Amino acid sequence: TINRLSSRSMDENKSDQVYNEIVLESPVPSDMEIAQKVIPAPVSVIAERAGIEASELDHYGLHKAKVHLSVLDRLSNQSDGNYVVVTGITPTPLGEGKSTTTVGLSQAIQMILHKKVFTCIRQPSQGPTFGIKGGGAGGGYSQVIPMDEFNLHLTGDVYAVSAATNLLAAAIDARVFHESKQTDAALFRRLCPKKKNVRTFSPIMIRRLVKLGISKTNPDDLTKEEISKFVRLDINPDTITWKRVVDTNDRFLRVIEVGKAPSEKGATRITGFDVSVGSEVMAILALTTDLADMRKRMGEIVVATSNKGDLVTAEDIGAAGAMTVLMKDGIMPTLMQTLEGSPVFVHAGPFANIAHGNSSILADKIAIKLVGSDGFVVTEAGFGADVGMEKFFDIKCRSSGLIPNCVVLVTTIRALKMHGGGPAVKSGAPLHNVYFQENLELVKVGCVNMERHINTALLFGVNVVVAINKFSADTAAEIAIVQSAAKNAGAFDAVLSDHWATGSAGAGNLAKAVQLACKATKKENFRFLYPLSLSIKEKIQCLVEKVYGGSTVEYTEKANKQIEAYTSQGFDKLPICMAKTALSVTDDPSIKGAPTGFTVSITDVRASVGAGFVIVYMGTMATMFGLPTRPAFYDIDVDLKTGNVIGLQ
């Protein structure tokens, strides 16, 4: 069956070329094949239709462009559009199509409802792209294009994040080394060298002097005591929490020893690498509101404590300004498009299980002005509602001040069967036959997980629409069970959506349900899960009881000491970013469904002061991932005749 979904010129006055023409095929080809059969519109055309002026674009080739933040000033008096967040139930390791649903819904809002829409999603990490999961462009006939550009380098934001993070890491080790080998006088001479026989402080040094309570601005006026305070950070190497990063899954970098070369004269220490998208710089990019805010946040990053117990920041190290310079282009969202030509902002990519898991505030703020009061911004929160959505509300919305109109909870029959007691679902392993056959009992029992997440979303006072992402093996009876259970749990509606196979045409009913849910939402009912005035442990207990369904929290000795230290330093009033498995509402990925009354273990706590939250590690969590025996990169190559990328998923 072939169906011509859309045949329209995006710029009829300038070209006879037809862009974004979709021909539906059955069976559905691979994501890469679909993406390469569609001719994307030039990004200038997408921008013009979205209301972005040519002077507000920095082009990165024909199909990508950075959008200037000045758009916000120009549209400051424009009313906000509807704000929709897409989340999901606890997924299988294969994923349940949340990105695909986000794109499909957006396409349907444009093509079926004929409303202005913007999709706001994260930039994918090359870790999962070349590892197990694949890219994050969506799939089937609901994806972002060009798909290969989206999933690979894009506009270099992740590289900028990595460069800024690693610059600070290098600066920390270099400072510790130089302080250990030099006198106060030697350090001072090198930090403030004479130029034309005159010493001066750089602006960032003045900031440090102010922090130290020294009001002098002429280096020659400092006393010996003041010089010592100025030049010596006196970092305790055992307290350094800042790690280097790389955007590759590399398990052998989890724990490393640095300083082994003879030139480092024995200044070794044990450290490690994190994945780039889990870094604090990436979180800052996602949560910042303008360049000045980013500069402030960079300076507030806490990297260690001194031997006296004083906090040492990126500002103290002297690297915060340079880090901001590396990120000055990255702060602008990247404009792309869906298969059907609706506009997309791709910006930031923090992981949801080890960071807060949402695209940028700036992308959302620009988009919500561009669509206007009758339009829609559809953004996505990583993993299940217990992970990315909770952080979307309690961290992102708290920082942005934006209030969502609707939650879309993506559900699949496959995942519900797993939560109902079905055989284990493992990446790279064949699915058991039960997932291809009707089994009403497994679905009925598994709905408890969906109901838990509906209840979590309702805690924030926002309407919930359940999107049942259609798979070919799903039966009418199974779908009816899910729809009934969802509505009984308090969902505004529960709608079957076939956007993967048919694009916007398959998501029309979902778009209509979302539109009605947005109209019915009373924003005055919106509330956060906890007030910031609660202690760190009280916030953790709140999350465990209300979101996960647990009852008891156990803390390691290390975690208790960290909480005491952060409380004494005033960081207890920050929101909590729980680092937990995405494969269970508990801290054990093997436990499915929606258990209650369980105990969770808090193993580690870190303050991401620049990002503005406290990371709490629940159970065992890796911040650098490993490659499987059979990674996705085996399938990825270049067609030497056409130059096209092949094998990306």
Image: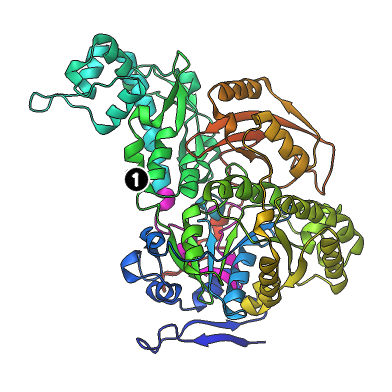
On the image, which quarter does residue 607 sit in? top right
* Residue 629 visible to an observer of this rendering: no
Residue 161 lies left or right of residue 523; in this view the side is left
* Residue 100 position within the rendered picture, expressed as x and y whole percent measured from the top left: 62, 66
Q: Is residue 217 visible?
A: yes
Q: Amino acid at mark 1?
A: Leu
Rendered position, 305 above or below 77 = above
Please check the rendered image and state whether residue 132 is part of the magenta-colored stretch, yes or no.
Answer: yes
Q: Residue furthest right?
A: 441
Query: Which quadrant is home to the C terminus?
Result: bottom right
242 drawn magenta: no
Residue 206 on image: x %, y % = 28, 28
Q: Residue furthest top?
A: 224
Count of marks, rendered view? 1
Q: Residue at x 61, y 82 (%)?
A: 24
Q: Name the outermost residue toward the left.
A: 196
Within the image, what quadrant is residue 520 found in? bottom right
Label 1 residue SS = helix
Look at the image and tell me in which quarter the N terminus lies: bottom right
Disc 1 residue crowd, few under 14, some 14–19, many 20+, Cα 10 Å: some
Q: Residue beneath label 1, please? A: 326
Give the colour scheme shown: rainbow
Q: Is residue 577 above or below residue 145?
A: above
Residue 226 placement: quadrant: top left
Magenta span of residues: 130-159
- 174 sits left or right of 366 in the view: left
Residue name at image x 76 percent, y 52 percent: 453
How far from the left and from the top, in percent, is residue 301?
45, 33
